[in-house]
Every structure is written in C-alpha cells, then in structure tokens.
Image (cartoon, grey):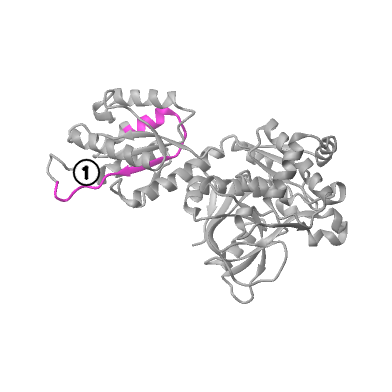
Amino acid sequence: MNNNITLGVIIGNRGFFPSHLIKAGRKVILEVLEQEGIQAILLSPEETINGGVSNLEEADRCVKLFRSHRDEIDGILVTLPNFGEEKIVADCIRLSELNVPVLVHAFDDDMQKMTNLDRRDSFCGKLSVCNNFNQYGIPFTLTELHTIDPLDESFRQDLSRFAAVCRVVRGFKHVRVGALGARPTAFNTVRYSEKLLERYGISVDTMDLSEAFGQAARIKEDDKDLQAKVEEIRQYARVDNVATEPLLRMARLAVVIDRWMITNHLSVTAIQCWTSMEQNFGITPCTLMSMMSDKLIPSACETDVTGALSMYALTLASQTPSALLDWNNNYGKQREKAVFFHCSNLPAAFFEKKPVLGYSEIFAGSVGKENAYGTLSGLIKEMPFTYCRISTDDLAGDIKAYVGEGKFLNDPIMTFGGFGVGEISGLQNLMKLICRKNFEHHVAATPGLNADAVQEAFERYLRWEVYKIE
C-alpha cells in the first residue's frame, strides 16, 4: 500500500495585486508541504510570474504540467495568496482532467497591512473560486477555517485530513477484491452486488475453496515459502498450545492466498470460514486474515466483500490496520456502549499483548477442537476508533455507507475470542439507522479518528450516500 501523497499545486493570482504576495505564498506553502511529507508538482517562478496562474496562457502551462504527471498526482491544492483569477483556476482543473480531490485554501490578511501594497482579499477570492467550481461541477474540499496562515496548526490538520481523503479516493480507483469461497448460506446479511461495485471501478475476483485446498495440498514440506510462513505465524502469535499439523495447514493456505493475490493484483480479500474451512481443511483462517490485515492488506470473514472494502477505506485513511467486528451485545444498561466481538481475526495491533492462537470455541462443538485451530483471542486495547460500513443498495441501484467515531474502553467483560467494549455517542440512533437502512451486522474499525476524511471521500468524490451519527 503506497501511503505517499503527491499534490498538484495551483497558486491563484489576480494580476493587479502585489506580486510579492505570490512569491512569499509559494515559498511558505512549499515549506509546509515538505514538512508534512507531501510531494508538490507546480509551475516554477521561471514559467510564470512567481509560479502563479493568472491568465489562459499560464493556465495552459499548468494543464500540460499536470497532464504529464497524471499518474503521480493524487489531489490538487488550490492556494490563494491573493484574490486569484477564479475562472482561470477552474479552467486549470477542468482541462487537466485529473478527476482527483481538490483542497481550496486562502491566506489570512494582516490587519496592519491593508493598503494596495499588501492586501490580499483572499477571503473574498475563495468565495469566487468555489462559486466557479460549483458552476463547473468540480467537487472540492474546504479548510476548517475560511482563511488560514499555512504555518498554523489548523492548516496542517487540514492537509492531514485531505491526504487521507486522497488516499481513499486513489485506493478505490480500480481496486481488485479477492473473494475466496462462496458466501455461507446462513449469512444472507452479507449479500452484495458485484455489478454495482463494478460501476465504481471495484472488481471482484473469485476462487473456490476447493481450488485453494487442492493447491495447498500440493505444496511440499520443503517449500521455502511454506517454511517462512510457519515461522511468521510463530512470531506473530503465541502458539504454545498448538500442534505442528494445524500450523502447517495454516501456512499452506497462507502461501496459496499470497500467490493468488500477487497473480491477480488483489488489494483486499474476503474469505469463507463458517464452516467449510473447518470441515474440509481442518483449520479456521482467522490468524491468516489477521496477519494480512496487520500488514495493511485487509481481510474479512464470511466472504463479506463490502465488509472488506469498509476495512480498506479505513486503512487507507488511517494508515493503520483495520478489523471486521460484529455489533454483538449490549453492555448492561449503559446504552451508549456495546460489545464488539469476533472469533477472532483481529489484527495484532488491536491487542494490548501478543495475541494467543487457539481454537474456536464456537466451532469446536460441531467440527471438533482439532479442526478449529486458528483463532486469536484477546481484549481490544483502550483507544479511540473510527467505524465504517459500506453496502450495495440493490433496490436503489447505488452504494451507501455510514461512518463515525467512538472509543474502546477497559470496561470489564468475561468472554472468549477477540472482544472489546466500545462507547459511541448516539449509539441507539445508530442502531436504528442500521436496522432501517438495511446495513449488515458486521462493521469495520480502525484506531484513530478519521471519520471526516472517510465521509468526505465517499460523499463528495465517490458520490455515495453517507450517514453519520454525531
């Protein structure tokens, strides 16, 4: 997963304003972008007056520059050291045809410098630029404050959010999902529409479990990839009470999945578990999925493809591992809290301590303990988190999502698997939304607070219907 961000930068300029504002503005913007680890592509001071854009000739140079870097540019930053030529800025974006997120920034005026020698009028110019963007049909993102000094911490936070938006939008362009195994019959809730996903450039590649099992069986014990994977599992989790044979079976399947993903250019996976994996291969795949998710390659259980995509969105935004959880239990009479649970395939990053590899207590009664090894158990550590769910709405012919934020707590609970108590403001209204709007019982979660960025990416740039409970 490439987390580096490159922005095309347009420095808006209205010619009769002082040119030194453009020169100084360009310098400070580039300094801040460099400090934030963001690459910038923009006109040089030699190509236009101080590198700004104020007329069609300069716009044409900007367009050619952006087009020549089409595969590198993840978003566009429009910055206004003065009022800016609103139509010219809009033309730059329309004619570049990059179809990437756009952040609009305007400099603060200095109240001690309001003569024609120094005044910016960027406050007003930003309104005009945004008005033109709306006329042109160009979606855009705003800074938290209407005008802001680039050196202010608020602008750095704007850049961080916008970078997350860009990663999500970029990540969902032509993403390929691997669906390993059929949806379990008992999980109607995770039905989805491949055709609706395809409309948005999201492709699903499938492989039957029998193919995976057959390939795994043909891997010889001296295979270097197999040996390396066994050692990786041992390093990843505590395996003291697990026999060698289940570890070998897990490693064989992991090698098959790795090779399948490389061959088919897959970014995320959704894997059938309940209970064909246990009955026909003798393991649960939870640890393998956890290891992938921990490496920022999200993997969801029960062939929940849109659940995997929900994890992917959060991982792109946060640059941290994501998990797929059940909205599983109430927490006594505390109505803003709920118990989150899975058997589990939670990434190691979610646990306070190194997770323990064991067997699924849910499956052991029906398939036998010896066929149910592979789950990871532990308490989710205390931390703020963002949650998200993407769903295809077949009746409406579109994609929808909800997103929000909460906090995992250290509240006591005695259970098994991977679990934690989460607190969410407005939880009861969220549950009503999930029930009435036909969302699934699975929800993706990731450490950190990134709901605004995910909502912005989905709603403004992917044009999905997004719900958010405040």
Q: Nearer the viewer, residue 121 or 10?
A: 10
Q: Nearer the viewer, residue 361 or 19?
A: 361
On the picture, is 304 further left or further right than 352?
A: right
Instruction: From the top left corner, tell me how far across and down residue 291 is, in percent.
Output: 67, 47
Among the 4 quarters of the image, the one containing residue 432: bottom right
Report the number of discs.
1
**Residue located 67% across and 50% down the image:** 236
270 over 446 or under it: above or below: above
Name the amino acid type tagged 1: Asp
Q: At numbered mark 1, what does the secondary structure look like: helix, strand or loop?
A: loop
Question: 10 Å neighbourhood of mark 1: few (<14), some, or many (≥20)?
Answer: some
Quadrant of the rendering where the N terminus is positioned: top right
**Residue located 59% across and 38% down the image:** 200
Instruction: From the top left corner, tell me how far across and down residue 179 is, in percent.
Output: 72, 41
Instruction: From the top left corner, tell me how far across and down residue 376 is, in percent.
Output: 71, 56
- Magenta span has 384? no
Q: State which region is magenta.
A: 89-113
Q: Which of 225 and 85 is in front in this view?
A: 225
On the picture, is 113 further left or further right than 123?
A: left
Instruction: List the single residue furthest toward the bottom.
Output: 333
**Residue located 49% across and 42% down the image:** 461
- Magenta span has 90? yes
Which residue has dot 1 on it? 121
On the picture, is 237 further left or further right than 102?
A: right
Q: Can residue 191 be seen in this view?
A: no
Instruction: From the top left corner, tell me how far across and down residue 208 is, in percent.
Output: 80, 39
